[in-house]
Amino acid sequence: MSTTSMRTHMCGELRFSEVDKTVSVCGWVASRREHGSQLSFVDVRDHTGVIQCVVDNEVDVRSEYVVRITGVVRARLEGTTNINLPTGEVELGECVVEVLRTAEPPPFPIDSRADKVDENTRLQHRYLDIRRERMQRNLRVRAKVNSAIRGAMEAQEFVEVETPMLVPSTPEGAREFLVPSRKDPGSFYALPQSPQLFKQLLMVAGVDRYYQIARCLRDEDLRADRQYEFMQLDAEMSFASQDDVLEAISKAVEAAAFAVTGETPPPIERMTWRDAMETYGVDKPDLRFGMTLVDLTDVFSATEFKAFSGAASIKGINASGKAEEMGRNKLDGLTAKAKQMGAKGLVWLKVAADGTLDSPVAKFLSADEQAELVQRFAAVAGDLILIVADEWDITCEVLGTLRNDLGRPPVWQGPYRYVWVTEFPLFVGVDKETGKPKPGHHPFCRPHPEDLDKFETDPMSVRALAYDLVLNGWELGSGSIRIHESDLQRRVFNALGISDEEADKKFGFFLRPFEYGAPPHGGFAFGIDRLVAIIAGEENIREVIAFPKTQSGTDLMTGAPTPPNAKQLAELGIRVLPPKA
Ligand code: ASP
């Protein structure tokens, strides 16, 4: 299939079955080893692999020269075969070498040794980095995932519709990138955080089932699982329940996993947000390991220990077997972290060889309390018990974080544990500026019908028909059943501190169409970069993106971002202030 007028075979394709054939391959010189005074072994590489070519020493080929080699496939001599190489049984002899292009020595070796090279050097020369097997594999895994997702969505009659990149500013929660308008100086477009509003309007428009492999842009601090621009499978469906949406998306995820691993993951489990918080302390639970949170509030209901008495929520985890490795310094570190997260403190207890509890606070706990602790955690000698007594959300969050810190395997490590987390709260926390609740996901999520009556009286306890998909502790994506009635939408906006007037001004383009017959609808979006990274065995999504930004948001290869010139600024009517000292 990859035959062209210049080549008959790919380098990595040649096998014993081709012996005696005259073939042409094209690629880059991976290495050259002199073999006696007459001949050299030249390894030629393309994205499928390398083939050893026996070349006259006179021929001047060096690393990364671009060559076309025509030769005869022959079996390697006994004892010289390389079982580590798929082409290791054969080589090309009687080679005619054409140098198509010479090359400067690359700044790093174009093979696995570059894994140890400073990442910035790799990013600066990304085109060379991508020449490597690892990156070629990752990009191809990504392409397979995209293709499988498209297949699965289309099989379910979702229609791919593209939505604009220059959009109005919308309240989806993340900071937006702004693009100045030349025609209307002083006005700005936003780059889409997601196609959220447009896909909902497509439902009003009767598209019924929409999907898009969409680029989304958010100006947020970058991390291992976050880039300014990332790709999502974005989907929306009409006349659908939560189950319908979860089922449709599950099919896409399963197809993607199958296309790469050849295995269909088991049916995706479900867990409510409250259960996830109670048991794992986080809303993206990593189900691959235990150390789950155990509720101890009742154990200490009548305790004399001040730090515990009267606490709203007392929970603990058993970091089993970790007592010895966690010395005083490390425990102080955990305590500091707990405090930094807002907890009043962290209690640790080590289970000694005789089964007693060894801890500075053991003397404050009654014999019954100690015995109950050991029993609840099924604790044995060498275990380390960590306890937090605080408000429920702090207790959960702190222990959930410590659990991950102490027990979490690398994200890509199998088994893959997918889970749907459902019933997210409609609101979380309070916006410091407005004093109003903040949306849990975004303001278009439908409140849980059972909680509608608590909407004005106890808004923080209202659940949403909103759900996340989590894989190995990474949030792959979120979605919800939407509000399709403008009066309910206004109620939610009001609760968020957005008045009717403001809503009309900002979201009129979104709210008004709902008056023309909006069907009930819901949708979902998941991050393809994250899914691909995990399936490809990578810890950082940068490794599965052809041209990513660094952690600090720059593109080392192109130099972006760069200051605009004076003429560009003048056209846009923008004056740039000097950087803050
Ligand atoms: N727009 C949401 C997001 O990007 C997903 C959704 O609710 O469909 O997270």
Image: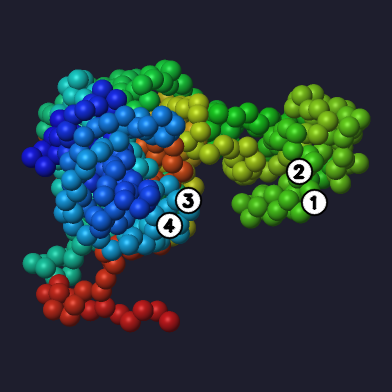
Q: Which residue is mark 4?
A: 119
* Numbered label attached to residue 325: 2
Q: Which residue is mark 1?
A: 328
Q: Earlier in the sequence, mark 2 or mark 3?
A: 2
Circle 2/circle 3 CB separation < 8 Å: no
Q: Which residue is mark 3?
A: 430
Foreground disc of the pair 1, 4: 4
Q: Position of residue 58 (x, y in %)?
A: 25, 56
Q: Residue at x 19, y 20 (%)?
A: 155
The answer to whether residue 240 of the structure is visible from this angle is yes
Q: Earlier in the sequence, mark 1 or mark 4?
A: 4
Q: Is disc 4 surrounded by few (<14), some (14 to 19) or many (20+) residues within 10 Å?
A: some
Q: Residue at x 16, y 54 (%)?
A: 100
The three-letter amino acid code for the residue at tag 3 is: Val
Q: Is disc 1 surrounded by few (<14), some (14 to 19) or many (20+) residues within 10 Å?
A: few
Q: How is the image coloured?
A: rainbow
Q: Position of residue 537 (x, y in %)?
A: 44, 37
Toward the front, the furthest residue is: 37
Q: Is residue 580 left or right of residue 182?
A: right
The three-letter amino acid code for the residue at tag 2 is: Glu
- Total marks shown come to 4
Q: Give 53 or 365, whichever is nearer the viewer.
A: 53
Per the model, the C-alpha gap separating discs 1 and 4 is 35 Å
Circle 4/circle 2 CB separation < 8 Å: no
